[in-house]
Structure formats: C-alpha cells, structure tokens
C-alpha cells in the first residue's frame, strides 16, 4: 500500500521503516531540514512540499500525520482538508485532544473524507502497540498498514471505538504513567533522605532499590517518545498536555481523580530529583 507520511522526526521515521520492511511504499514530508536529511539517510523517499507529496500518491490516497505538536497537527490537517478528494484517508497519529478529533472527524466526513485517529506505543524494536479510533470502512481499508506496524509480538493493534477513542485512551494512559512517575519520584526521595532515619545508605543501595521501581524514563518510553510529545508551559514548567487535559476532563465529568490531580500539581511545582551523590548530608 502507498502511504504519505507527514512528520519525519524519530517516531515518524520508525513508522516509515516498519512499513517499508513490510513492502509498503512510503513517501514522507517534513518542513524540518534535519528531519528530512535523517529520513533520506534511512532510505525514505521524501517530497519537497505538501503539494508534491499529494501529487506522488495515487488516489484514493492515504495520509499518515505524525507531527509532534498540537498546533502543528491542526495546521497540517486543515491544509489537507482543503487539498484532498473524496475517498482519501487521513490518520491523525499526533497529540490531538480527543474533543478536537471528534469535531474534525465531523468536518472531514462532510467532505467525504475518511478519518482515523491513532495512538502508537513503541513495544518492540520493530513494532508498536497501536490503538485506532474511527469508522469500520476506514479501519478495514488500512488493516494491512496496522498489521505491519503492530504485529502480535509487539502487542498488536486494536480498534477501540469511534473517532476520538484512540486519543482518549492515550490521554488516560498518559495520566496513569504520570501517577506512576509521581510514586516513583516519591520513593526515590525517601531513599535519598534515608540518613534522616539513621540509615546511611550507600549509592549502590539506592541504585539497587531504585532498580526495583519503574523509572520515569521507562514510563515515558512506554507512553511514547516523550521528546516528541507536545508540552504546554505553566509558569515556565513543562507539563504534558495530555495530563492537563485529563485532569480538566475528570473535573468536567465530576469524576474523582486525586492521584492524577496530585501528579499534575507535583509536576508543576517539584524540581528534578537529585542524583544519589547529591542527597542530603
């Protein structure tokens, strides 16, 4: 199958390599020269402009969008809506809010375009766990793509509901990992302050104990490539948008979410954890 891939940062290139390995044809586009250069080095065909990319694809076309920022994703999808023809398929695998995804699906369906939202979680060197939201006809059409990206050994792919469902589950998943990261940070903080309890732990002891806990890096990698996730800033502190969205969503539903709220508050106010060598004397 022929796929136009918009977004050639590391996650996008990983997607391209998986598809190429399964004999799919991929042509990419990115406005970032560094991302384009890296894609060319990986053997990925690249178009110089969005218009050139669309011209290289045979109708009905498939466009897979993996732009790392929320605003950038919105701009790309708006541009595609003006350029695509009935029957084309658009997959939003970016950091869009689920409510925006639902509104966009309604708009694109009115133009006779097929639209899916997707959430990818690296699960193996050669694959992902993949969640997909959207109508059955579009899902069935892209089944070979999903099977290439998410083989059973990597967790497989799952059609989780209508448009917005994959982005909703991604948001909740990020909240779960935020709570895990918060608990891990608190555990490390106790280890680093053990001397206050009369225990002079060695650096090795702290490293061994910390190794029993899920690390922030592990949680981030399981939630997706953290470096490629859009972040908002509150008072200069970087916070994952999904965590903010999830807390706001829980409040709007009247659903109690104290751990998620605490994780957000702590993310806003807590400085990075010190290394073992920096623990209090």
Image (tube, rainbow, N blue to C red):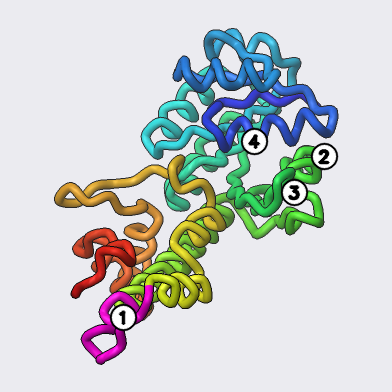
Quadrant the C terminus occupies: bottom left
SS label for mark 3: loop
**Residue 19: horizontal and vertical position, in percent?**
75, 33
SS under mark 2: helix
Pointers 2 and 1 in contact (C-beta within 8 Å)? no
Q: If you read the primary sequence from the N terminus, does the residue marked by circle 1 or circle 4 appear first?
A: 4
Q: How far apart are marks 1 and 4 (CA)?
A: 38 Å
Local secondary structure at mark 4: helix
The local crowd at label 4, few if under 14, some if 14 to 19, many if 20 or more residues have their Cα within 10 Å, is many
Judging by the rendered image, the residue that carries numbered circle 1 is 190
Quadrant of residue 60 within the rendered picture: top right
The residue that label 2 is drawn on is 144
Instruction: Identify whether 255 is placed above or below 214.
Output: below
Alpha carbon distance from label 2 to label 1: 49 Å
Q: Residue at x 25, y 91 (%)?
A: 198
Earlier residue among tags 1 and 3: 3
Q: Locate residue 188: give its quadrant.
A: bottom left
For disc 4, the marked residue is: 14
**Of 223 and 204, the residue lying toward us:** 204
- The answer to which of marks 2 and 4 sits earlier in the sequence is 4
Which of the pair 231/162 is nearer the observer? 231
Q: Name the residue under label 3.
A: 150
Nearest-to-viewer mark from 4 and 3:
4
**CB under 8 Å between callouts 2 and 4?**
no
Tell us which disc is closer to us: 1 or 3: 1
User: Which range of residues does the magenta coloring cover?
Assistant: 190-202
């Amino acid at each position: 199958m022929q796929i136009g891939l918009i977004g050639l940062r590391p996650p996008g290139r990983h997607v391209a390599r998986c598809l190429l390995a399964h004999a799919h044809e991929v042509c990419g586009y990115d406005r970032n020269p560094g991302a384009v250069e890296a894609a060319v080095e990986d053997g990925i065909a690249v178009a110089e402009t969005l218009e050139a990319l669309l011209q290289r694809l045979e109708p009905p076309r498939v466009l897979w969008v993996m732009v790392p920022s929320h605003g950038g994703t919105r701009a790309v999808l708006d541009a595609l809506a003006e350029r695509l023809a009935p029957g084309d398929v658009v997959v939003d695998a970016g950091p869009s809010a689920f409510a925006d995804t639902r509104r966009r699906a309604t708009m694109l369906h009115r133009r006779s375009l097929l639209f899916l939202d997707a959430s990818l979680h690296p699960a193996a060197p050669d694959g992902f766990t993949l969640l997909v939201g959207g109508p059955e006809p579009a899902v069935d059409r892209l089944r070979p793509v999903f099977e290439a990206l998410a083989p059973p050994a990597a967790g497989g792919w799952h059609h989780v509901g209508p448009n917005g469902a994959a982005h909703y589950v991604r948001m909740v998943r990020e909240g779960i990992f935020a709570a895990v990261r918060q608990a891990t940070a608190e555990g490390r903080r106790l280890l680093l302050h053990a001397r206050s309890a009369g225990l002079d732990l060695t650096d090795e002891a702290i490293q061994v104990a910390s190794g029993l806990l899920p690390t922030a890096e592990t949680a981030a990698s399981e939630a997706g490539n953290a470096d490629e996730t859009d972040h908002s800033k509150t008072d200069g502190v970087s916070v994952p948008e999904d965590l903010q969205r999830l807390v706001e969503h829980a409040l709007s539903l009247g659903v109690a979410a104290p751990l998620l709220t605490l994780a957000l508050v702590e993310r806003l106010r807590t400085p990075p954890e010190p290394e073992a060598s920096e623990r209090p004397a």
